[in-house]
Amino acid sequence: MIDSGANCSVISKGLIKLLGAEVDKNKKPSVKWRNNSLESSSISYNISFTVGQGENSCTISEDFPVMDDNKPWILLGTPWLDRAGWEPIVKREFKLMHKGKVITVPLSVHKSHSFLINSKRENLVNTSILPEPALTCVREGGSEKKNI
């Protein structure tokens, strides 16, 4: 799963087993998931994922907190998307084409912004484009905490 709102990537113990990857059980980064604090069971270093095929591909490596779940899954967060060069993250902008007009809205991966948007009745409405943080990663020892 790709989550552009997550400030870190996580991987399940089940996928680590399928990949045959090694884990460091001495380091257990904390992860806050949907308002419940969880401690990862370990960390796995330098896990590589290839996107695309042949010459139209790239491989991105990252260290992953390992979550204690035997089902194989992975969540690729904003740092991974940044390393991969995903344009909305790299350029920090949301861009779309609507009725022949290009609409560009600046993005921040650190905090939400409020923008004035015209509703159908032409009233101005103040809305936030980013939801409440759903995932928080805490560096080992609790020294750094980042909300997503």
Image: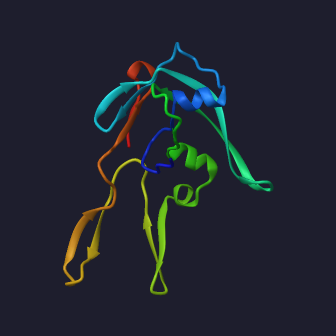
Height in image: 10 above or below 56?
above
Q: Is 87 left, or right, of 93 in this rendering?
A: right
Height in image: 144 above or below 114?
above
Q: Report the front residue among 142 and 6.
A: 6
Q: What residue is rendered at 49% in x and 28% in y?
A: 70
Which residue lies most toward the right here? 55
Q: What residue is rendered at 43% in x and 63% in y?
A: 106
- Colour style of the rendered protein structure: rainbow
Q: Report the front residue among 90 and 49.
A: 49
Q: Position of residue 12 (x, y in %)?
A: 51, 31
Location of residue 30 (image quadrant): top left
Q: Position of residue 40 (x, y in %)?
A: 44, 24
Location of residue 136 (image quadrant): top left
Q: What residue is rendered at 21% in x and 76% in y?
A: 124
Height in image: 131 above or below 6?
below
Which residue lies most toward the top here? 26
Q: Is 137 left, or right, of 2 in this rendering?
A: left
Q: Position of residue 46 (x, y in %)?
A: 65, 30
Count the numbered circles shown. Answer: 0
Q: What residue is rendered at 52% in x and 27% in y?
A: 13
Q: Position of residue 119 (x, y in %)?
A: 24, 78
